[in-house]
Image (tube, coloured by chain):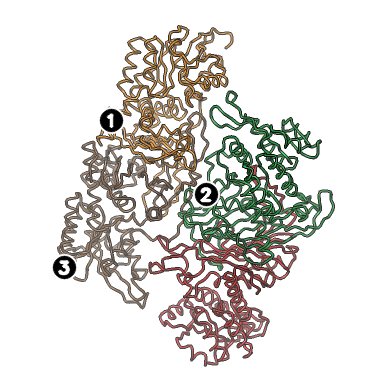
Chain colours: A green, B red, C brown, D orange
Amino acid sequence: MSKSKAHRVGVIMNGVTGRMGTNQHLMRSVSAIIKQGGVKVSETERIMPDPVLVGRNELKLRKLSEISGVEKISTDLDSLLKDPAYTIYFDAQTTERRTEAVKKAIAAGKHIYCEKPTATNSREAMELFKLAKAAKLKNGVVQDKLWLPGFIKLKTLVETGFFGRILAIRGEFGYWVFDGKPVPAQRPSWNYRKQDGGSMILDMFPHWRYVLDNVFGKVKAVSCVATTHIPKRIDEEGKPYKCTADDAAFAMFELEGGVFASFNSSWSVRVRRDDLLNIQVDGTHGSAVAGLRQVYIQPLAATPKPIWNPDAEDLTDYYKDWTLMPDTIEYDNAFKVQWELFLKHVVCNTPFRWTLEEGAKGVQLAEKAMESWKKKAWVKV
Amino acid sequence: MSKSKAHRVGVIMNGVTGRMGTNQHLMRSVSAIIKQGGVKVSETERIMPDPVLVGRNELKLRKLSEISGVEKISTDLDSLLKDPAYTIYFDAQTTERRTEAVKKAIAAGKHIYCEKPTATNSREAMELFKLAKAAKLKNGVVQDKLWLPGFIKLKTLVETGFFGRILAIRGEFGYWVFDGKPVPAQRPSWNYRKQDGGSMILDMFPHWRYVLDNVFGKVKAVSCVATTHIPKRIDEEGKPYKCTADDAAFAMFELEGGVFASFNSSWSVRVRRDDLLNIQVDGTHGSAVAGLRQVYIQPLAATPKPIWNPDAEDLTDYYKDWTLMPDTIEYDNAFKVQWELFLKHVVCNTPFRWTLEEGAKGVQLAEKAMESWKKKAWVKV
Amino acid sequence: MSKSKAHRVGVIMNGVTGRMGTNQHLMRSVSAIIKQGGVKVSETERIMPDPVLVGRNELKLRKLSEISGVEKISTDLDSLLKDPAYTIYFDAQTTERRTEAVKKAIAAGKHIYCEKPTATNSREAMELFKLAKAAKLKNGVVQDKLWLPGFIKLKTLVETGFFGRILAIRGEFGYWVFDGKPVPAQRPSWNYRKQDGGSMILDMFPHWRYVLDNVFGKVKAVSCVATTHIPKRIDEEGKPYKCTADDAAFAMFELEGGVFASFNSSWSVRVRRDDLLNIQVDGTHGSAVAGLRQVYIQPLAATPKPIWNPDAEDLTDYYKDWTLMPDTIEYDNAFKVQWELFLKHVVCNTPFRWTLEEGAKGVQLAEKAMESWKKKAWVKV
Amino acid sequence: MSKSKAHRVGVIMNGVTGRMGTNQHLMRSVSAIIKQGGVKVSETERIMPDPVLVGRNELKLRKLSEISGVEKISTDLDSLLKDPAYTIYFDAQTTERRTEAVKKAIAAGKHIYCEKPTATNSREAMELFKLAKAAKLKNGVVQDKLWLPGFIKLKTLVETGFFGRILAIRGEFGYWVFDGKPVPAQRPSWNYRKQDGGSMILDMFPHWRYVLDNVFGKVKAVSCVATTHIPKRIDEEGKPYKCTADDAAFAMFELEGGVFASFNSSWSVRVRRDDLLNIQVDGTHGSAVAGLRQVYIQPLAATPKPIWNPDAEDLTDYYKDWTLMPDTIEYDNAFKVQWELFLKHVVCNTPFRWTLEEGAKGVQLAEKAMESWKKKAWVKV
């Protein structure tokens, strides 16, 4: 690509010192895009991101700069927001800090791209969208799961009519997160503290919203109960703490057309299934069980005819009639794919429908689920 | 057992010309008990059932008599009810006919044993119990799943403290029932007609009630939605008919102690799991996934530590860390086991807690689930 | 069925001393039907065939009577044809003898059921149909392959729309028939002598006709060449003989709608495929490869994306993306199924579309194929 | 080879910016030959190609130069043709452009080596040969498949008499080419447009010609029908286009000696066989099934004796009696092997029988096949 024209795009990357920010957004997305020579737009044009890493801890930033090859770092967000060399503001801070920072960036006329949830409540999340829209700024929210191979395959199945009429959807998410003693926990402790933004519902329901909305049909209503399975855990410093956030949620969603989706999400479940997230879709003409990357399918013609006979030993292997869906395209990193789409959206004005409004919808579903839990009733979305 | 004293017990078996009645209650239970020489009570005593087969079609009864070796048949229930030689009345008719027949049998002073559901509504079901109680008659309802190896093993796990504190329960029941064209359906057509007593909720929720109540804890509340996935099917004669009954139900139960159980039941689901009915139980100290006969377990010490990383291909085999629970006792036919317990209850007055009241509870849960579906809210039980 | 009314049907079975006649028509069809208590028509009615075995060799007939349990035998066909106790005439003689015998049976007013080919040329085959029709006699031709599990499954796939639009069909039939020295041949020597009715085209094309017509679409045109691969063989007595009949045929059929079917038939081919007869069907939405009993399917969603790169070693296993179609119904013997349908047709007047006319069509296709071979051009059917 | 004398041979490489030209002819053939130190002729002599890359897009040429290490590039073919430093003209342009360019090169006295098809019709293709011959120029056409391991092995089997008398040949070529939505097609869109030179017959029949002619015997006649299975596809830019070229062809060839070869070629077939191209050869003494690289063989002595019995379940594994033919020599890239032979032919006058005349024969077979399709009759070749 060395001979093509490069559109340079300055990107303020705020909050990339966290795990997701560093690994997914910096290393595997922006740095990877730079290394591959930018985003190809046509035979003669490409987009080259020019990032600056922003954070509060200069030491961490220096280390990041070293491993990523991104030279510019700063602890002074306000100055950067004034700098016209940067047209995009990206935010991967904790949810609590995000809203205010995004508002400032909008005020400074930057295009906005940020992690989800975009705010701790849907009112604020929606406000962010309205502000960006009023300022005619481009905006987007990370919805990475949509570009995971498993979901691309599911979408392909829907589009090619594999399922016939879709009947129902079953989601099982989660795995066993150790409580810290003696085995250290594999998730950060703030995940289990409401006061620090932790909550299964708040964390995962925004994902379920865009996955359901985009792949199967708009979410119309939710019924949810949640609980805190493990009331006490040991934190990163080896100290016990009280878990104040829900760590498991049992939900049903009603999609347009009356399709029900049953979704269990838990950090206290042991995994006897193909993947940490499994989504089964049943239709009149076929079914699929999708993991994050692999999808097993069973068309009507391969559907066995089980006989319900509890009396006899059933030696049937119910796994054998499923076929692994082959990879027919190459799958790039899901985060990087969305970054490339957003950069093209900003530079070439190509469509990008994963806006702050879509992000707000995710936050809204989490809120409605919590309302349903409180009311012990279905809530319309 | 040939030398021991036999207590002869006359049993009126009404409605055993149906599939379940013939196979489970007559052939595999009462006939099998006769063939094994009765129910052993002690070294010197045994109980020998002396059945008479009752029905409306004499031709069918004769055929039944031939294959079962039970010589007595009759189409005249009323005369039999007057005959003091028969002390037990068993009913496996369709639900619609059951209530009235059981009432007559109670009036005639017979001990009652019958199939579930005991009535089409819980008011009547409860009335049956009260009538039997007032008449000081012994009574019982078939709750066969409790004696399936899978549930016996689950109960063993609960009783030995394997789970630690139980956190949550997930049930998945169902399989693909063909709609009749071109592949014939493997269930009778009345199952899909409300007017003929069909309904997934009515059929299976009584089972979920006694399984949950007996193995895990009393059901306190239910949230349920249901649907009719397949609106038209082909019946036994090759004729299309309208499906008026629910064929899939998505439910959550709250048990005493605040444990949630999520239960999906469907006749339009393709099976990617170990068995047609799978119940996963997660506890602080271990988890189990039970089928009808086999149970896989994973104690805390065998629990792997998955890392959530959608970006990388996950080649983990999540099935490998589960251990098949070995058979440590011999499992007799579940129906037969309960028959033997009821016969002993009648003759020797041994305890038998699966009474008509318990049967009424099953019907009640189905009703409450339907109420919840209508109200779109949780309903207390 | 002992109490239901039995309709007795006298059947003259002529030529059942041959391999096919004995095994398929007598032992596995008519005898089996008698043993199962007849053909069930309704709860109260059934049809009971009452056969007489006819042939020229009394010794052979006696042996047959012994193994089959059919008591009546006769070497006098003419007398039987006059006997009103027999309403059906069945013929499994060699093709040369069949035409005349069938004509006599029609003249005697018997319903006709016979093996294929119904005559050595389509003119005569068609004449048989016209005679039977004019005499208002019921008539049928054996088309057993239609009731083989493989073809029932293919038909199910067609009917349920599995293939989408069908694009093309590929048939491969045949296997290695040893030439007799030193390994004895596994087929009779007359198969390889034109003068004795032998010929691959004459033997198999009637099958291809009804399979294609019934499962995929009417055959409209044929292009065929044939050859005699092995010019000399050793007969049953160990003597060499000249092979005068074609033993391999390479054909293309055009079906209505412009679908092409390529069919290779050979007794000098070694088998590297799933079954002795393999039929591959490709459609826009899926493909199937059917053997006589098993069918492998690959829906669009399971279709891999091979890259044509002769340069690199291709380690792809092209068999792994196919799923074995499960058995969803019970498959009875194909010959017996058609016998039962014909008996019902005669007694209850139920539809039966595999008439002598359909049999004539099979002979016609063989003729047209031979004409194409001679002309070296496509011939319309 | 560094000490041996190098014969420098100037090669004009025209049209190597396409996929085949770049990968096979430049990178894996000419560049690879240069990297290995040239073509060894004897202990003291070698041939060193000295290529210049010619095309219309300078940018693409520069990129090619970079990756291949070939320094000379040019967009001015006419000047190069005048340059005596270049003695060989190689052409891998699209077929439409090829004829004229080759003519000019012949006029300029260059030896000719080019891709197939050498022209869009056999008259022109033959003219090219006659012109080159008249000018006493060496000439050759790419017939790479002959040097694929699979075909070298087949030829070995023929030459060593493995087959005995060859009876028949069956070819199956093809795989599923996606139509572009949602899965992108894995072949260029021009393949499916007649007006752009697309056509299964035009693409593959030249291959079948030289494979059959060289390995089994001269093609004497052809019968062919073709079709366009998929009438609409999505092109590289995501736009739908009409498919005007045949994408599947069903052909029979008659070889000298009366051997028939049945060849199905399709881009809309799902692959249940060993390789994307499978050629089965049956002979009196043995059979072989060849893929591009691997060959399975079954000699008479290993031939099983199947019994045709559709009535019984056939559990025979017909794959197990075949033996994988071992690699006994090292197989170099097929394109490179032919390049080396041509370079030796030019420099050392060694024999080279894959001339422009042979190339013309390939084009002729495609034409005759199309004539046969139109006439619906066999056509002599």
- Is B254 displayed left or right of B96 in the figure? right
Q: Are marks 3 and 1 on the same chain?
A: no
| Amino acid type at mark 2 | Thr
Q: Given the image, what chain letter belongs to the residue carrying mark 1?
A: D
Q: Nearer the viewer, residue D291 or D13?
A: D13
Q: Which residue is mark 1?
A: D221
The number of callouts visible is 3
Quick one: quadrant of the N terminus of chain B? bottom right
Q: Which residue is mark 2?
A: A323
Q: State the image coordinates of residue B353 (x, y, percent, origin top left).
A: 66, 79
| Amino acid type at mark 3 | Lys
C-alpha distance separating marks 1 and 2: 43 Å
Give the label, 3 or 1, closer to the camera. 1
- Is B105 displayed left or right of A364 in the figure? left
Q: State the image coordinates of residue A80 (x, y, percent, origin top left).
A: 74, 35
D168 to A274, vertically: above or below: above
| Amino acid type at mark 1 | Ala
